[in-house]
Image (cartoon, rainbow, N blue to C red):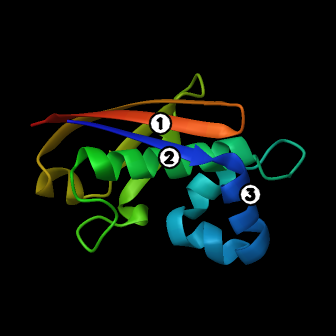
Amino acid sequence: MIGIDLTSISRIQKSYERFGENFLNRFLSSQEQALCIKNDKTMDFQRLASFWAIKEAVSKALGVGICSELGFLDIVISKNSRGAPLVELKEGKMSYFGIKEIAVSVTHDEGLAIASVMITKA
């Protein structure tokens, strides 16, 4: 199953500037939020938009969107040792959807972040 999402970095930045922590807490865990902070302690809006796009792409690949079956916080993003994103679902959701593996690719350019997700069923 495949999902893709395109997100405007400026739209995500404006939402963050308007709603602050409430916006972040709506779709990112504290660990994910920490990954979006640069070394100089400022927000990395490219990464923030990329994380939004990843979560939307996962929900689209599953064919449910963000809903009661699958919330933003059910989708967990981390990084591997080389800094590439890793995605999994919270405990119980992987089996609920019958998922074996989630692969993700993300990029950003010209003010946009794009995420592509491929999900392999168990």
Q: Which residue is mark 2?
A: 53
Residue 3 in sight here: yes
Q: Quadrant where the C terminus lies?
A: top left
Instruction: Please name the amino acid that badge 1 sits on.
Output: Ala
The tag earlier along the polypeptide, 2 or 3, is 3
Q: Quadrant where the N terminus lies?
A: top left
Q: Which residue is mark 3?
A: 13
User: Distance between the Cα atoms at labels 2 and 1?
Assistant: 5 Å
Which residue extends farthest right? 40
The tag earlier along the polypeptide, 2 or 1, is 2
User: Distance between the Cα atoms at labels 2 and 3?
Assistant: 13 Å
Question: Residue at 75% of width from left, 49% of height from top?
Answer: 37
Query: In the picture, residue 50 is in which quadrant?
Result: top right
For label 1, count other residues whose C-alpha is less than 10 Å away and answer few (under 14), some (14-19) or many (20+). Answer: many
The percent position of residue 43, horizontal first and vertical second, equals: 79, 52
**SS class of the residue under badge 2?**
helix
Instruction: Please name the amino acid that badge 2 sits on.
Output: Ala
In depth, the one of 63 and 39 nearer the eye is 63
Q: Are marks 2 and 3 in contact (CB under 8 Å)?
A: no
User: Distance between the Cα atoms at labels 1 and 3?
Assistant: 17 Å
Q: Are marks 2 and 1 in contact (CB under 8 Å)?
A: yes
The percent position of residue 118, horizontal first and vertical second, equals: 29, 32
